[in-house]
Amino acid sequence: MKLGTLKDDSRDGALVVVSKDLRHAVITYDVAPTLQSALDDWDYLAPLLQQIYEDLNRSAGSRAFELDPRRLAAPLPRAYQWLDASAYLPHVELMRKARGAAMPEDAKKIPLMYQGDSGDFIGPCDPIDADEAWGIDLEAEVAVFLGDVPLGVKPERAGEHIRLLALANDVSLRNLIPAELARGFGFVHGKGATAFSPVAVTPDELGDAWNGRKLARPVSVRVNERSLGTPDSGTDMQFDFPHLIAHAARTRRLGAGTVLGSGTISNHGHGAGCACLAEIRALETLRNGKPETPWLKPGDRVRIEMFDASGQSIFGAIDQQVRQCAPAHPPRPVQESGE
């Protein structure tokens, strides 16, 4: 089934079941008022929501309304936890090569992961509010929404706790990242508000593209009229989702409603293109000695979408426009950074 959150006058919005073709929706206040409430009691509530989904796909009915993605918040407008990995080694390798840095010795054994801001996820059509001087970039990712995960879960059992999948735009402010990383304590200012696709879907919606560990479909990434690429999310993912979940739960439980991102989708050789501007700039630097592609600027439009084998949009599109916010302290001169 496909689930979304309709914006209203509350912090968490109203849960909606969305039709397979993304055209209609039904508010589910009588079953679960919010997605978080559904995740909290998933085993009981998911079958009830599934019945609504099946009924909606058969006939829109009197409760259904035409869905406008601009009215949607992120599927979870705020979450108990947002963990973002860098599971695609081609991305890490390229970014480090461009700045002359070596790969960590354990890069193929231990995933990179940070804990980011989960208090203000934004909707698929909400603006990217940032200062152009910060070096605004997009990052197309796949994300999973989890149920309760026990401390110390093993990879072979971790996938059992995946409830939903979605696309994410993990906005990066590239000019702010290097100074933060140099201080040795991770991201704060270098990551803007993360946007999510209009809907999150249960794994069964993905058919053969989902094997319980990876989602194997190309993601379409565009800026204005330019296609950045269509890298495949199931290719070259060094750490699959069960391994990422087990890594995150090594020393703590993960509560229902935790969201975990894959990191920038990236394939070896980059023949299918890129899912962020940083990779394009890194390739230009290696080829020409300097980057040519600018970061995002006010007015630019970002579109991230994934289609099934028949050409149907799976999650709907992240379709955002960059909006200049009030300028803050100017960034220091920086070196390109990316993971």
Image (cartoon, rainbow, N blue to C red):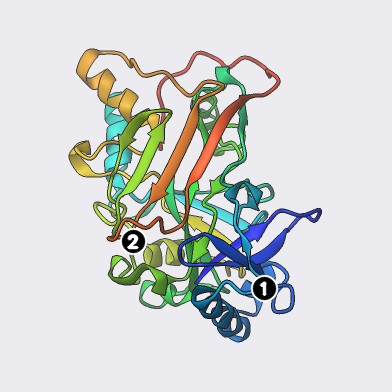
Closer to the camera: disc 2 or disc 1?
1
Seen in the image, is 68 located left or right of residue 308?
A: right
The reply to whether residue 138 is in sight is no
The residue carrying pointer 1 sits among few (fewer than 14), some (14 to 19) or many (20 or more) residues within 10 Å by Cα, namely few
Seen in the image, is 312 located left or right of residue 161?
A: left
> In this picture, is 187 found above or below 6?
above
* Residue lying at 57% horizontally and 63% vertically, measured from the top left: 24
* Residue lying at 50% horizontally and 74% vertically, measured from the top left: 57
Seen in the image, is 38 located left or right of residue 333?
A: right
* Residue lying at 59% horizontally and 61% vertically, measured from the top left: 4
Label 2 – label 1 distance at C-alpha: 35 Å
Q: Mark 2 belongs to which amino acid?
A: Leu
Task: Give how far across and how far down residue 254 sits, in percent.
Answer: 58, 67
Which quarter shows the C terminus?
top left
* Residue lying at 27% horizontally and 42% vertically, measured from the top left: 90
Q: Mark 1 belongs to which amino acid?
A: Ser
Most foreground residue, 200 or 161: 200
Most foreground residue, 27 or 328: 27
Count the numbered circles shown: 2
Seen in the image, is 312 located left or right of residue 322?
A: left
Q: Secondary structure at mark 2?
A: loop
Tag 1 residue: 62
Tag 2 residue: 215
Q: Secondary structure at mark 1?
A: loop
> In this picture, is 189 found above or below 313?
above
